[in-house]
Image: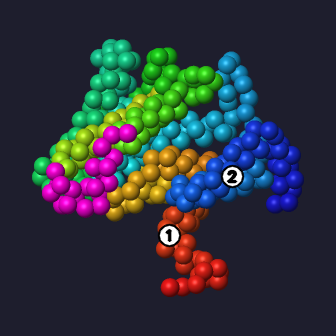
Amino acid sequence: MLEKITEAAPTNANLTGIAILLFTGCAGALLLLRGRREAWPLLGLLALLLFNSVLSKNFFSIVERDGAYYGTPINLLNQGSEVMLLAIGLTLVIAVRGIDLSVGSVMALSGATCVILMKEAHCGPLLAALLSLAVAGGVGLFNGALVTALNIQPIIVTLISMVGVRGVAMLITRAEPVTHTDATFAFIGNGHIGGLPFSMVLVAAVFVVAALLCRRTALGLFMEAIGDNERASRLAGVDDRRIKLWLYGFSGLCAGIAGLVAASYISTADPDRVGRLRELDAIFAAVIGGTALTGGRFYLGGTLIGALLIQTLSTTMYIQHVPSEIEPMPKAGVMLLSCLLVSEESRRRLLELLGLKRGQ
């Protein structure tokens, strides 16, 4: 272990690593002083970055090639974009006491639909992508319609969709991975703008749209009202059913975009593996970011931090050669610790245990 630390430490002592650590630490401290819930996942991310700065060789190294930047920090953003997109949509659904377990399967369907349209229907990449997003949004609206019109439990509706939608993806691809060679479509997952991955531009665009709708219009207030007390919000005149319907549609759309990124990044539409268990990562990202599964308050910024934390954790275990069969154990442990830090009750009990705060 000491030899590994000695080898890794000098290579990570670069300006990029120091800047990232200082920015993350200062942002976490500032949010903590302001009492923001986003501080805890950010501090958890800082802990992971510090761990990698010591034990992961060249973790913070970034190189410039042909006008684009490459390196582990860039890969974290690029590979984490899928979970970020899923988590943004899921955060809004969870805010109104819903859940969407179908987003991983919708990812697979979106990517498969796009590639099949390009290869077999000879559609252009733009038209194929738009039609795929329409299909993904349609699945979301279908889920929302069953939840709002028929009053079926969201977990049941989306669990059925999770199975059925992946079945449709398997059907249209004949249960085989379908490759593509279209350079325009490949740009979605592998292209760069201003040296940064194009996938992050998509994440930023979706985040800005969601944030503006939720924080600059009455929609956010209505969502919190529905999540806190659905019956009271309905009596106050809030059209909770229509809001839920469109939020499920937005979640499906986010999953569709994530599916296009995934299919573009690996140049393959894999109906079996793409999006597999991604819905769990997205839910964890939202919860770690401070959004309560009971509805009400939601934190889009915390969701992005939670998604980045999960991706950093996965990358760390890969770099440290953690066997795949035991990988879920440390991942679950870190997620549990992060959730405990987010919980006000667990923090209060910890302070009481350490003798820093008297019990009530």
26 in the magenta segment: no
Q: Whole-Å distance between the Cαs marked 2 and 1?
A: 21 Å
Q: Amino acid at mark 2?
A: Gly
Q: Quadrant of the N terminus?
A: bottom right
Read off the residue under disc 1: 344
Residue at x 41%, y 30% (from the top left corner): 260
In the image, is 80 to the left or to the right of 248? right
Can you say whether 243 is above or below 288 in the image? above
* Contact (Cβ within 8 Å) of mark 2 with mark 1: no
| Residue 327 in sight here | no
Q: Nearer the viewer, residue 102 or 230?
A: 230
- Residue, x 66% and y 48% (percent of image)? 24
Instruction: Give, as a single range, the part of the protein colored magenta.
Output: 216-237
Q: With 64 as the anchor, is 10 left or right in this view?
A: right
Q: What's under tag 1, amino acid-wise?
A: Glu
Of marks 2 and 1, which one's residue comes earlier in the chain? Answer: 2
Q: Position of residue 69 (x, y in %)?
A: 67, 27
Q: Which residue is farthest left?
A: 150
Residue 25 shows which numbered tag? 2
User: Can residue 228 be found in the magenta stretch?
Assistant: yes
State the image coordinates of residue 75 (x, y, percent, origin top left).
62, 37
Vertical order, 180 against 233 (above or below): above
For the stretch drawn in magenta, what is the main secondary structure?
helix
Q: Residue at x 22, y 52 (%)?
A: 157
Give percent across and percent down for residue 188.
Answer: 48, 25
